[in-house]
């Protein structure tokens, strides 16, 4: 009986991991299908990764069929999900459309080193969907600058 419950739990766990491989990985996944599969979003980081402070990034947005999504309203929300953290930043990234499904932002801010998410919301006409990207080690390459602290930010 207990063995059965155990195998069932294991099977469920294995299936979940197969369906959502990102749960078991801290790898930075740069291309994602949005939660309700309406869009696909690809994030391009600066060459040396995100740093603590203000960053550039670009996004490529396509629909479920791979067609470039133009004229969408995109919002990007930095969020620190670590236990005891769970905060964002005050700076709201400005997103500009550059054509053919590409969008850029020059003010994506991270206020401290560590694990961050970028929640990207795509709104086109009456379709809304979002994807969450996870970055395991923002600022890993560069030591945190003076002024970095845990909280919404200093900007
Ligand atoms: Cu924090």
Image (tube, rainbow, N blue to C red):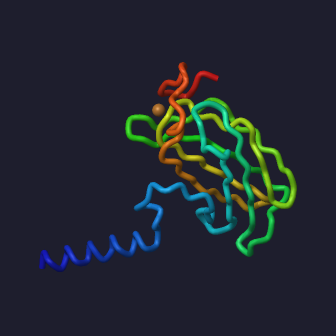
**Residue 115 vs residue 38: left or right?**
left
Query: Would you place residue 103 above or below residue 4 in this image?
Result: above
Provide residue 57's location: percent of width, then percent of height.
70, 45
Query: Would you place residue 46 above or below residue 102 in this image?
Result: above
Position of the C terminus by quadrant: top right
Query: Would you place residue 43 above or below residue 3 in this image?
Result: above
The residue located at (75%, 65%) in the rendering is 62
Provide residue 133's location: percent of width, then percent of height.
57, 53
Closer to the camera in the image, 73 or 149: 149
**Residue 22 vs residue 83: left or right?**
right
The answer to which image quadrant residue 36 occupies is bottom right
Position of the N terminus by quadrant: bottom left
The residue located at (71%, 35%) in the rendering is 107
Instruction: Give the residue furthest to the top.
Output: 146
Instruction: Give the residue furthest to the left.
Output: 1
The residue located at (54%, 41%) in the rendering is 79
The answer to which image quadrant residue 110 occupies is top right
How many numbered dots are placed on residues in this image? 0
The residue located at (55%, 35%) in the rendering is 88
Provide residue 77's location: percent of width, then percent of height.
62, 42
């Amino acid at each position: 009986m207990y063995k059965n419950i155990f195998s069932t739990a294991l099977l469920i766990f294995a299936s979940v991991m197969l369906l959502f491989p990102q749960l078991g990985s801290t790898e930075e996944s740069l291309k994602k299908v949005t939660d309700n599969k309406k869009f696909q979003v690809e994030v391009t980081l600066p060459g040396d990764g995100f740093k603590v402070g203000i960053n550039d990034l670009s996004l490529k947005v396509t629909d479920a069929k791979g067609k470039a999504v133009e004229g969408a309203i995109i919002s990007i929300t930095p969020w620190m999900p670590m236990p005891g953290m769970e905060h964002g930043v005050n700076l709201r990234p400005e997103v500009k459309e550059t054509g053919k499904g590409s969008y850029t932002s020059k003010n994506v801010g991270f206020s401290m080193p560590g694990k961050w998410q970028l929640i990207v919301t795509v709104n086109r006409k009456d379709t809304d969907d979002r994807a969450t990207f996870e970055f395991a080690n923002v600022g890993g390459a560069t030591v945190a600058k003076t002024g970095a602290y845990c909280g919404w930010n200093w900007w």
